[in-house]
Amino acid sequence: MDANIYKNKKPLILFLFPAFVFMAVYLYYPFFKNILDSFMQIKQLGVSGEEFNTPWYTNYVEMIHDQNVWTSLKNTLIMMVVTLVGQVGIALILALMVDNITKGAKLFRTLYFFPIVVSATALGLLFNLIFLYDKGMLNQFLEVLGRKTLIDWKGEHLALFTMMLPVMWQYVGFYFVIIITGLNNIPEELYEAASIDGATKLQRIRYITLPMAHNVLCTCAVLAVTGALKVFDLPWIMFPKGMPLKSTFLTGTYMYYQTMEVKNVDYGAALAVMIVILGVVLSKVVNTIFKEKDY
Amino acid sequence: MKQKEMTKSFQSRPARKKRWKPSVALVYLFLIFWAMTTVYPIIWVFQNSFKAKDKILSNSFSLPVGNLYTTANYRKAFQNLDIFSAYKNSVFISCVVCAGVVLLAGLAALPPLFRCIPWKLPGELSIPETGGCLCSL
Amino acid sequence: MKLKKITALLLTCTMAFSMAACGSKKEVATETKGAGSTTGSVELEVVTTFAGNDGNAQNYKASYEAWERETGNTVVDMSATSDDSFKTRVVTDFETGSEPDVLFFFNGADANDFIKAGKVISIEDIRAEYPEYASNMDDGRIPASMVDDKAYAVPVNGYWEAMFVNTEVLDAAGVEVPGADYTWDAFLADCEKIKDAGYTPIAAALGNIPHYWWEFAIFNHTTVEDHLTVPASIEDEIGKGWVAGMEDIKSLYESGYFPDNTLSATDDETFAMFVDGKAAFLIDGSWKVGGIVSACQSDPDDAATLDTDKLANFDVTYVPGSDTRKATDLIGGLSMGYYITKKAWDDPAKREAAVSFVSYMTSDEVVPIFAQHTASALKNAPEVDEEAFNALQIKAMSMMAGCTSLTGAVQDVFNGECRVSTFDGMPEIVTGNVSAADAVQEGLDVYAAQ
């Protein structure tokens, strides 16, 4: 094998080079520049930092004292739990069901994938109309059912619920497709052997399907957790600027708010660094919890 | 072969009895329910696109028939807002991104496969082997 | 082995080639603005706010297409609806060197950055080469920049902010349409009556667009002369007025005169409430006349579908005054205008085309189409033909006839980051989470640090 490596080295580098250059320019350079920016004083977008902040760590200190950062972290953690239980959980249940039926599997696959194909902006508008206070779909339903006062779905008490529901709904199809592909890879013989041995459906699921799909579930968990850190489009369309009362900020939307709306660009850069660190730490944690097992 | 034939015949007998088991019906019910929640919003958007703006708020669920029907929204989108050029831009971006990703990622994915199992072509590797090679990067 | 090498080389070449092609394609996408004098006709990049749902979007499109036919040049139009992200985009474009040739933009503090950087040409300098430039405008009415007191932007249409009322709701609550002598106390009494009748007195989305209430609440504690002065701190006269203004909005909120969901609703939602006869008062700008008229048409673009009965329910009047401000003192002015950028000026072909374009768009024939019932800086404003206007526009014009003064908006001076604590923080102020004094002081500190 050693001799082969030496022989193949040149084309190896040739193959890797284009992708590496692309990533270096569009990923590594902005990433490190961003870390540098979080220590500098930047007046506006498009202007590069000229001098360092005084003291240089001031943005990070501000982050610790900023109430909105803690709110956003709390909301993001709730979102992660919701996506793990909601998106991956429901997707798992759906995949198990679809795996066990004979007809219509392809149809369901297509139908469940719809929400991902629709742009998040369009979905945001759609859900805005559904949750609208005055004549939204839900409130109209309630009026028809006889309720007198309207529910303010975007008010303080229900805002988080209203925000997480569409986000959860949208990506179920995505995880569904991943899991069902993983389930299809489980060899039929195992199921047949188990049913010959007298296992019921539930037992088959518990002892064969779930363990075999372990790796796929691990991937889904990592994707869900890091996705929750970055999710932006749907929450921003429905709850811009963290309204009401800045209680619905997520890490992604708060970073956008600070950079684009408040135009505190270096603070936004510091927030971005925080999100990256959180992402790396959390995905390592998830990876150790769902350790890769070889069956 | 004989084993397969035996399992097949074994399974075919209970299949006739199993057809209308309530659990299967329940499963289908749940799946159809979820499919409706994914499809209905799109149908809703489509039917509302034929209504005037204020009518959307007052009659969201009714079908756009009679005096609710109007093509003004589509006209506005294509003439005033020039959505056609937006479509063109999106198609262009999608094609470029697709081509770019396939080329870049495809090229980058090949060497480690050549490297770790140089006597096998990429197509011959199974998923765990590919995964192992990629992870060992 | 050789085959592998060849395949590898071929693939890499294809890669590099397609990347270069992709790269240049992206460049082409950004350069279709810009180059073009090769064919003899000039391509002018123009950015305005006449786009999307703006009332003048169609007028603008028709006007520049007419100019294109007349001169044989082409306009690359990159207009977008005016909001905070539009302002950011324009300023960033100037920073990165991708600014347009002609720009229709605000002439207040939002333009300070690129005027200071010398990226636009002043009207004086343009007149050195083209003496007839903007000669049909009254120089005294062209606003000068805050940076160096020179005029840069040629205005087209002005704006005013006043109070729209839904007379149907007022009648149902037994309240008279307010007149020129409307006081704040009379306003509070009317709101109480409207609330008792089961309607929402004020249509406003404090969590989304508190701009107009912010402006008038402060105006009620300042005078026409010192309204545009930003106080140094909350301790001085004007500063105390600002805090009192915020407190006024808070007391309105606590009395329940705003909609139930004012903190989580969007401006469109509360506007829909107003149009549907659920709310009585709406403070907004002159552009909302077009918005109300569209809402009364079953086809928003076709004036023939106007429901005149529904439109008759709306009127526009003065904003309740105080001891320092008459009800007829309104906010308004000529806040936007056409700039010619240095980028276009330095290119002789583009310079010619840009001057021709701006002169056309600000000519005596075109300005009235845009300005309609609002003010302009024309020396010879044409006679108002009442036949061409709808009922609400006529009511607006008669209201403006009784207006005693038009002051600029102090929020155009106190812009950007300064406004965050009091605009984005308005929900916190009205619910009492943050005291009005603290919020105002925070904003003033940001302003002072600039």
Image (cartoon, coloured by chain):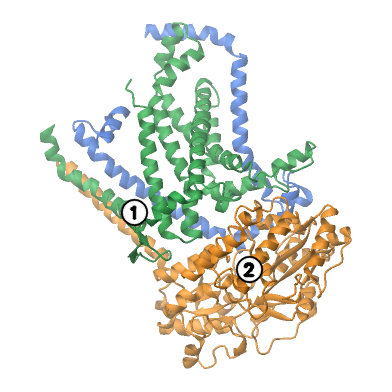
Chain colours: A green, B blue, C orange
In x, y percent, where is residue A65?
A: 46, 50
Which of A189 and C141 lies nearest the eye of the viewer? Answer: C141
Q: Quick check: can you spot residue A119?
A: no
Three-letter code for the amino acid on which mark 1 is drawn: Ile
Relative to C95, residue C205 above or below = above
Relative to C450, residue A172 above or below = above
* Residue reaching furthest to the front: C235
Q: Secondary structure at mark 1?
A: helix
**Chain bearing mark 2:** C
Identify the mark at residue A59; answer none if there is no mark. Answer: none
In x, y percent, where is residue C138?
A: 62, 89
In percent of the image, x 45 and y 83: which residue is there? Answer: C351
Relative to B86, residue B47 above or below = above
In x, y percent, where is residue C345?
A: 43, 83
> How many numbered discs?
2
Three-letter code for the amino acid on which mark 2 is drawn: Trp
Figure quadrant of residue B82: bottom right
Question: Share a chain, discs 2 and 1?
Answer: no
The CA span between labels 2 and 1 is: 39 Å
**Chain bearing mark 1:** A
Disc 2: CA contacts within 10 A as few (<14), some (14-19) or many (>=20) = many
Judged left or right of residue A250, residue C5 is left
The residue at which mark 2 appears reads as C242
Q: Quadrant of the N terminus of chain C?
A: top left
Disc 1: CA contacts within 10 A as few (<14), some (14-19) or many (>=20) = some
The residue at which mark 1 appears reads as A35
In x, y percent, where is residue A229?
A: 45, 43
Figure quadrant of residue A4: top left
Judged left or right of residue C348, residue C212 is right
Mark 2 or mark 1, whichever is nearer to me? 2
